[in-house]
Image: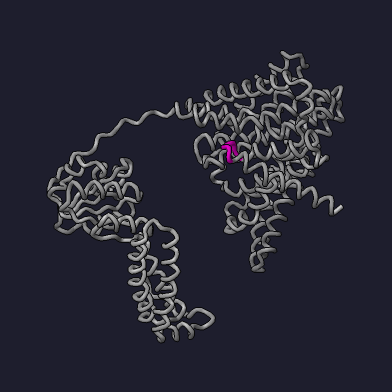
């Protein structure tokens, strides 16, 4: 038994490691990679893992973990603010999509009740798929990302009462006993829901305090899993959704001081189980049915994508979304979802739908899920850019000071520090920056900055480069920095050029360009931190400073020697190794420093380091 389980785990891991990176490298995303991997190892292809249904049931725990993490990120106050998109947009979309798809199913020959069930089930979207696509693109907090999440949340909640009603719809009549049984189930569900909320508020804080007090990461992680799985099972036993229970538990912990630790413990499980879920969806796809009736299956898949996308766009426009957001939601949410499998299976068990129809629709939903990443990628590349309004080309600012002594090119973090230091001195200077939004922002704080491209000689001329004495190049991009220096040094040879070096290679390029002064931006801060670390270990301040004073000239000499072999990687590496040995020799020569290091106690000195306020 254990061997078989390990063998199945090995197959899943191997399929994921081999297939997913290939699909992701093609730019199609991880989700499609997992789906394809599932198809390959499932019964429809290689048949390496025969029990696809069992894997799918287990892997739905991944959705539980996903919604728990989402709940952790949604504080109750924020959820209260989301009530309008959740219940407004969500209910509008479910109503319109169910109506459109239900009427379509009715036109294809289904009974009214069966058409309503099919319309509702196919109207549900895939929560893990959509959130994964948005997360890959860092769009969860965008306007369409928030609306998509609100809609998915409402769909998950709406699926619960439908699942409760389906067994009743399957009966020949609504007998009194059936009604009473349904009311009893609803009462149990409401009691469990209320018990989870009120019990969680009272019990969760002391439970996590006790777990944290043990100072054991394993115990704390175990407590996180206990709460997650316990809440999910409570809702399941009450006839509700496990995912809903996990979501509520996450919300209850969203305001907790342990939220970040809980999320860090749960995150690895969430990623693995979600990948397993998508692979299980691929495994359950009956590819043989596609081979038997390809026209019917592909036609229904295309019909689902078009009808659902159109109904979603209609709902989004009715809700007040702009065209760009509307089309994004229409493509992103055009697929079927994992809850469709549950609803369709329940309808088949209640004899509302024929078994062959359930199998066909499950395959259609699986294909729609596999198609969505490709459709969204194409939309993102070719359609969405069309909705971007072209920004009017801004004219460069006219300079009102044509006789500065200093020209500062670049007003980012580095340039702002220098600008503040120069402020108040009676030295005229001009600041140029190519980022128009940044220029407008810093001007609101009283900074005198001009919008201009320092690589353009006419702009430098207008900024007073002929009269200036110094050009400071503080831009962060090494290529732009070198372009400014090369052009300015030829046109204005009288200028002294001071430049910021982003890294060691950039510094060497600046030195080769004969720049008057090169400052490696991280070197002073790094050496200052090193000095404070040595002091924190118990080395006297003067000896720590002596270590830095020994290192700095040696490093500058090494940089000059590397400059002589610039472009020869082999000789550069030899120079670095030689310099490391020389530094050891220098430290060995100062026996007092080494003696102080040997005397460092095993624990850091309790004396706090000298106070220092870093520059922001």
Q: Quadrant of residue 44?
A: top right
Query: Could you tell me if residue 245 is visible in this image?
Result: no
Q: Residue at x 76, y 46 (%)?
A: 11
Q: Residue at x 33, y 72 (%)?
A: 553
Q: Position of residue 256 (x, y in %)?
A: 59, 56
From the viewer's perspective, is residue 344 above or below residue 534? above
Q: Position of residue 507 (x, y in %)?
A: 34, 58
Q: Quadrant of residue 188?
A: top right
Query: Could you tell me if residue 331 is visible in this image?
Result: yes
Q: Position of residue 418 (x, y in %)?
A: 26, 57
**Camera-side residue of 308 and 513:** 513
In the image, the segment drawn in magenta is: 25-29
Q: Position of residue 72 (x, y in %)?
A: 60, 49
Image position of 437 (left or right of 376)? left
Number of numbered discs visible in the structure rendering: 0
Location of the C terminus (image quadrant): bottom left
**Camera-side residue of 10 and 80:** 10
């Amino acid at each position: 038994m254990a061997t078989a389980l390990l063998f199945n785990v090995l197959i899943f891991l191997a399929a994921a490691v081999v297939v997913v990176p290939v699909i992701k490298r093609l730019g199609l995303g991880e989700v499609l990679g997992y789906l394809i991997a599932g198809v390959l190892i499932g019964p429809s292809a290689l048949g390496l893992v025969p029990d696809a249904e069992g894997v799918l049931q287990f892997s739905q725990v991944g959705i539980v973990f996903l919604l728990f993490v989402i709940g952790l990120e949604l504080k109750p106050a924020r959820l209260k603010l989301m009530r309008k998109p959740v219940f407004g947009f969500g209910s509008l979309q479910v109503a319109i999509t169910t109506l459109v798809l239900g009427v379509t199913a009715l036109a294809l020959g289904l009974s009214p009740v069966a058409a309503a069930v099919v319309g509702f089930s196919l109207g549900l979207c895939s929560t893990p798929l959509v959130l994964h696509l948005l997360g890959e693109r860092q769009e969860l907090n965008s306007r369409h990302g928030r609306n998509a999440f609100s809609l998915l949340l409402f769909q998950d909640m709406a699926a619960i009462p439908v699942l409760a009603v389906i067994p009743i719809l399957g009966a020949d009549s609504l007998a009194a006993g059936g009604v009473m049984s349904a009311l009893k189930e609803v009462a149990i569900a409401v009691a469990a829901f209320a018990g989870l909320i009120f019990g969680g508020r009272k019990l969760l804080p002391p439970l996590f305090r006790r777990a944290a007090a043990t100072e054991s990461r394993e115990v704390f992680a175990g407590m996180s899993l206990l709460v997650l799985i316990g809440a999910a099972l409570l809702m399941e036993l009450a006839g509700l959704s496990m995912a809903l229970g996990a979501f509520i538990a996450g919300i209850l912990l969203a305001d907790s001081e342990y939220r970040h630790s809980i999320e860090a413990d749960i995150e690895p499980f969430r990623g693995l189980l979600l990948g397993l879920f998508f692979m299980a969806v691929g495994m359950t796809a009956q590819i043989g049915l596609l081979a038997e009736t390809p026209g019917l299956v592909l036609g229904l898949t295309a019909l689902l994508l078009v009808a659902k996308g159109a109904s979603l766009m209609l709902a989004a426009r009715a809700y007040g979304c702009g065209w760009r957001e509307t089309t994004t939601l229409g493509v992103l949410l055009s697929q079927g979802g994992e809850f469709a499998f549950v609803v369709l299976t329940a309808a088949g068990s209640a004899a509302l739908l024929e078994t062959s129809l359930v199998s066909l629709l499950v395959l259609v939903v699986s294909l729609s899920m596999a198609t969505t990443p490709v459709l969204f990628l194409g939309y993102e590349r070719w359609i969405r850019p069309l909705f971007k309004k072209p920004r009017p080309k801004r004219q460069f600012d006219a300079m009102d000071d044509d006789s500065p002594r200093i020209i500062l090119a670049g007003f980012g973090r580095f340039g702002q520090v220098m600008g503040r230091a120069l402020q108040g001195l009676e030295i005229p200077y001009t600041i140029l920056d190519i980022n128009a939004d940044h220029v407008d922002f810093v001007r609101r704080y009283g900074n005198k900055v001009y919008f201009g491209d320092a690589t353009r000689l006419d702009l430098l001329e207008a900024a007073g480069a002929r009269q200036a004495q110094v050009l400071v190049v503080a831009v962060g991009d090494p290529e732009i920095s070198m372009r400014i220096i090369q052009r300015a040094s030829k046109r204005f040879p009288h200028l002294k050029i001071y430049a910021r070096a982003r890294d060691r290679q950039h510094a060497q390029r600046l030195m080769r360009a004969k720049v008057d002064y090169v400052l490696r931006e991280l070197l002073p801060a790094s050496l200052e931190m090193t000095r404070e670390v040595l002091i924190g270990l118990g080395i006297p301040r003067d000896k720590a400073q002596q270590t830095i004073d020994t290192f700095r000239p040696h490093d500058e000499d090494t940089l000059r020697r590397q400059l002589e072999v610039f472009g020869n990687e082999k000789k550069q590496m030899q120079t670095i190794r030689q310099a490391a040995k020389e530094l050891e020799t220098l430290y060995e020569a100062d026996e007092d420093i080494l003696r102080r290091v040997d005397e460092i106690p095993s624990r850091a000195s309790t004396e706090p380091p000298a106070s220092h306020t870093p520059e922001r």
